[in-house]
Image: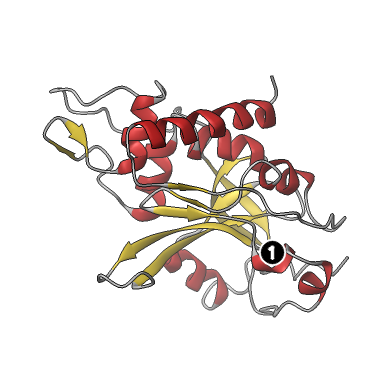
Amino acid sequence: MNATEVLRERVETFRRLAAEHAIPVVIGDPLPLPRNPALPSGLYDVFDVLGHVDTGDLRFGPPAEVHTLEAWQDRDVDEECPLGDPPSIGEGYVVLGDAEDDDIGIGDLSLDVADGSVYFIDGDSYRFYRIDGADLDEIEVDEFAPDLPTFFTRYVFGPDYPRLASSVCNLRVYQTHKHRYVAPWMRLLVAAGLIDPPSRERPRPFTAAGGLLRTRLKPRRGPVAGV
């Protein structure tokens, strides 16, 4: 099976297990999106399968600017962005209070519309390339996957989610309480058999060989044109 077919099966499994185990996560239904030739096909492969996803620490969904062709054409573009102002397909967040919308985003996961890859650049690095490193032709980023279906299969609905949450949110993903993981998505991954349940042994630190995450140099570029 290809990554999209695997993702489709896992989404169905995760929905069922979340309901069976009363795990508080959100896996929304897909919304119809118009095809835009300026955007990678992987965007539609994923968001034809699912809609909004909230793991309790990260949230994902189709960017607002791809909901209509007009929204893409009329989007606000940051002309100073060294990476071409890519659309965000997800972010980490921290809850600040009890209100439903009382949280703050702590890192965007970007979709490279030129090659379809999914990557992350931390705030300090972004500010450097925008100001002090404005004369540099290449930008160093953390690339998670070469395309969106692979990213969702490996890093959201897959065994490399702990690496994603640790990298973007700086989370203690293996934190436990009463012999189970605190993070709801971690408990869901255990229920799906994609990661091991907690043990008395300390988890091994992430290594460069694990998963698909790699450091990559991307060319400095301007915003992508409309449809």
Q: Quadrant of the C terminus?
A: bottom right
Where disc 1 sits, the SS reads: loop
Q: Quadrant of residue 190?
A: top left
Residue 211 on image: x %, y %:
49, 30
Tell me the amino acid under the disc marked 1: Arg
User: Which quadrant of the figure contains the N terminus?
Assistant: top right
Query: Above or below — where is 176 with respect to 77?
Result: above
Could you tell me residue 84's position as x and y percent?
70, 67
- In this view, the residue in front, 33 or 226, is 33
Which residue occupies the foreground of this view, 80 or 226?
Answer: 226
Q: Residues within 10 Å of mark 1 (few under 14, many from 20)?
A: some
- Color encoding of the figure: secondary structure
Left or right of residue 155, residue 21 in this image: left
Where residue 92 sits, quadrant-wise, is bottom left
The residue at the point 62 percent across, 35 percent down is 150
Q: Residue at x 64, y 57 (%)?
A: 62
Residue 137 to residue 190: above or below: below
Q: Does 55 sit left or right of 28 as displayed?
A: left
Residue for badge 1 = 220
Residue 207 appearing in the image: no
Figure quadrant of residue 74: bottom right
Residue appearing at x 73%, y 64% in the figure: 67
Q: How many marks?
A: 1
- Please state if 57 lies on the left or on the right of 201 as rendered: right
Reply above or below: 123 against 190: below
Residue 55 location in percent, x, y?
A: 41, 48
| Residue 208 horizontal/vertical position (percent) | 43, 33
At 34% from the left edge and 73% from the top edge, which residue is drawn? 102
Can residue 59 be seen?
yes
